[in-house]
Amino acid sequence: MSVNLPGTALAVAAGLSAGAAAAALCAPDRIRVRLVGTLSALLGAAGAVAGGAALAGHTYAARLPDLFALSGVTLQVDALSGVFLAIAGAVVSATSIYGIGYASGPGRGRWAQALWPLFAFSLLLVPAAGSVSTLLVAWELMALCSLLLVVSGDPASGRVREAGVWYAVMTHLGLVAILTGLLWLGAAAHTETFAGLRIAAAGISPAVRGGVFVLLLIGFGSKAGMAPLHAWLPRAHPEAPSPVSALMSAAMVNLGIYGLVRFGLDLMGAGSRWWWLTTMTLGALSAVYGIVQAAVANDLKRLLAYSTVENLGLVLVGVGAAGVFQDSGHPALAVLALAAALLHTAAHAAFKTVLFLGAGSVLHATGTRDLDELGGLRTRMPVTTGVFALGALGAAALPGGAAFPSEWLLLQSLIHGLAVPGTLVVVVLPVTVGAIALSAGLAVATFVKALGTGFLAKARSRAAEQAHEARGSMRTGMGLAAAACAALAVLPGAAGPALARATACAVPGGGPRVSAGVARQLTALGSTLWPLMLVAVTLGALVLLRAGLALVSRRAGQRATAPLWDCGAPPLTARMEYTATSFAEPLQRVFDDVLAPESDLDVTPHAESAYLVERIAYSRAVPDRVEHRLYNPVVHTVRRAGLAARALADGSVHRYLGYGFGSVVILLLVLAAAR
Amino acid sequence: MLSLLRKIVSVGRVAEPAPPRPEPAAADPAQRIRTLRGSAQVRCVDAGSCNGCEIEIGQAFGPVYDAERYGARIVASPRHADVLLVTGPVTRNMAEPLRRTYQAAAQPRVVVAVGDCAIDCGEFAGAYGVEGAVADVVPVDLAVPGCPPAPDQIVAALRRVTGR
Ligand code: SF4
């Protein structure tokens, strides 16, 4: 029997995870950070190998009945899991290496470090799960580890604690939805393994499947930052330590997409059209809402978190479109849309890792995430600025950036899909195309703002003036992720065969011909990008040539320098620059009705005369409107209900015993009646 | 758009016929102008004028006197300019900006002092806010006297610079 590559790699990853966690707890302080970081990076590499092998066509299935009480552990890895395994593994590697430099400062506890490899392993375990119970256990492990890591940043800070509470509540409500949905599905299908579900799902009534899908959409969608269930994202991501934010934003949220694709498309066989139209609509809504919020955000990491909402929205659009096309009998289009979604997931993971790690370096160097306080980092942090620029190019979905091929592919699949009949489709598809175009345009503005006001021009605060370049390991981590960005931008065609295999898992009926078509599409896209690459290479060569000539020529020393023209009235100060707030002001004005920004002007007159002004205080905030309108009423109601329910718990033991007895009796009655 | 076109057609050309070409300043050994031939990019600097001179400069570049047909063109930054058209007495606040503007202009640069104030502080000589005439602050190449000088005089001076 030959060695099964994905299985072996996963076993190695499990071992490394245990080893790294043990090292974090026991190793002496001198080598601890380095050891844990290296082991975690290897763990990520093992995960990436497992994913790569699965994408290359190896599959793995195993049942380990003794590993976990009652249900055992079932694993299965196919090409679809492979996509998410490979992404998670690669992100874990880059962030772990980065984490070595990031964590070297004081105040990083052993526990937080021990959680890191566990979280990383749970990210590999979720896509490798082969049964409902294994998936749920892995999912909860992932949720708990990430929650603890979020609050590990600075547990004493009120904002961190608040973010932790939001995240804990929302992720567990999501878990409840997933749990209910999957148990319902399992009960209806009388099996819990994926292989069994795939066969039994066709026999389940559409109503039950619809109900299950809605629950799964809520659960998985909230993990994927789908509006309006995104509220935890812009809170948890900024407060978490930066490598954790990178891992959450680039690897964890993807698993929401994985869940939807696995259960909705693969196991439940695409179901009905309304499922996917809903997914598409919510995806388009998330994309636009996310990027509008990102465009006006001042906090660099909050901006990135909202950009995650946007990008995952785009992925949801792709998944939804795949479902719609599959349902209406266009497997070729479905494969194309799903391939675009998966490719975008990978691209987003690459550039978001770069961006979050870059933001982490900035935070590490300056102690602030407020774009208004930054600026002028280019001269002091050239490497960080360079990789951040590459990531921003990707996030802006411009040609030459990582996200361009996937968004282009997505738009293509949607435009071809206009031939699909159906009134709703005819309305939803063009609107979605418009939403994607709008979000792409706003993404450009957002990332011009992030890079321009954050890194260029002059420093606007002392902290930014005294910034220092990131440490060596941090630069390595960012560099690895940036290399992935560049590879995805230049050679999307190389992903063709792997994506064809992955989509074939979820969209049956495509057949080899259709998959080959997707591969060809990607190759064609890759070749259309070649002129761009030629231009880039030529430009790069010219710049190098010029620099070389300047070095060798005699005139190099005679270069004239002149002061910047400042209208004759010096000096130009940093206070004259565009800040993030002023740059976004026109956008804020345009989207006034959507954002409902709050600004407050407080004028204090002089004590002696009402006409003389002593002080003017101006404050501005753009709160998340969905959160205000949707969550606050719910939170208030729950709080009121909780206060009212206090009367039930008055401290009397007799009463509590009575409650227990009463509920057992009711349960028995219900069970008896249901038989 | 259409009404604009109609206006152009109905009004026609209003520029006055070009007077004979003045002798180019470059031929004048007393003047320091050497290399400007054919065209000049002009930046106006108001160093403290009463705005009378500005109005006349505006006329010089208007449709009637049309200095542009002789190769002079107003630009928005001294970085683009060969010629500085300086008006007014140089006030204390404008002395340094005028020096910087002169430094910022491309070489070879030509400074034209427009109006009596620019030449010798005119009306404002001895006033408390006045630093001096333009020549006290930057080297002047050509002067256009008058309070304010008529547009055709300004045009004639510019033609001496462009040589057309
Ligand atoms: S020369 Fe006469 S018109 Fe020109 S600035 Fe002086 S006072 Fe005004």
Image: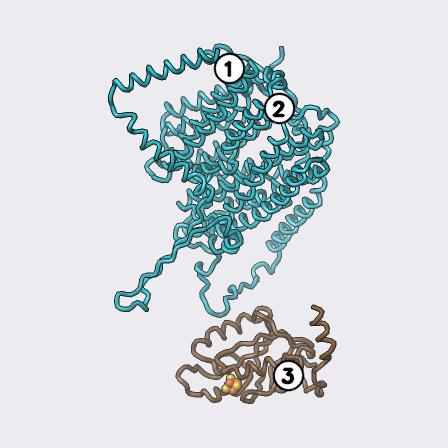
Chain colours: A cyan, B brown
* Residue reaching furthest to the front: A673
Disc 2 marks a residue whose amino acid type is Asp
The residue under the point 52% across, 66% down is A565
The residue under the point 37% across, 28% down is A110
- Residue marked by disc 1: A73
Q: Are marks 3 and 2 in contact (CB under 8 Å)?
A: no
Residues under labels 1 and 2: Cα distance?
21 Å
**Residue B63 image position (x, y, % from top left):** 66, 79
- Residue marked by disc 2: A266
Disc 1 marks a residue whose amino acid type is Val
Number of residues whose C-alpha sits closer than 10 Å to that of mark 3, classed few (under 14), some (14–19) or many (20 or more): many
**The N terminus of chain A sits in image quarter:** top right
Q: Are marks 1 and 2 in contact (CB under 8 Å)?
A: no
Query: In the depicted view, which residue is nearer to us: A200 or A69?
Result: A200
Left/right of residue A299 with respect to residue B156 in the rendered view: left
Quadrant of res A284: top right
Q: Are marks 3 and 1 in contact (CB under 8 Å)?
A: no
**Residue A114 image position (x, y, % from top left):** 40, 26
Mark 2 Cβ inside 8 Å of ligand 1: no
**SS at mark 2 in the image:** helix
- Residue marked by disc 3: B155
From the image, state whether disc 3 or disc 1 is nearer to you: 1
Give residue B93's mark: none
Residues under labels 3 and 1: Cα distance?
92 Å
Say above or below: A469 vs A218.
below
Say above or below: A433 vs B138.
above
**Residue A517 image position (x, y, % from top left):** 73, 31
Disc 3 marks a residue whose amino acid type is Val
Q: Does residue B26 appear in this view?
A: no
Say above or below: A593 vs A626.
below
Mark 2 falls within which chain?
Answer: A
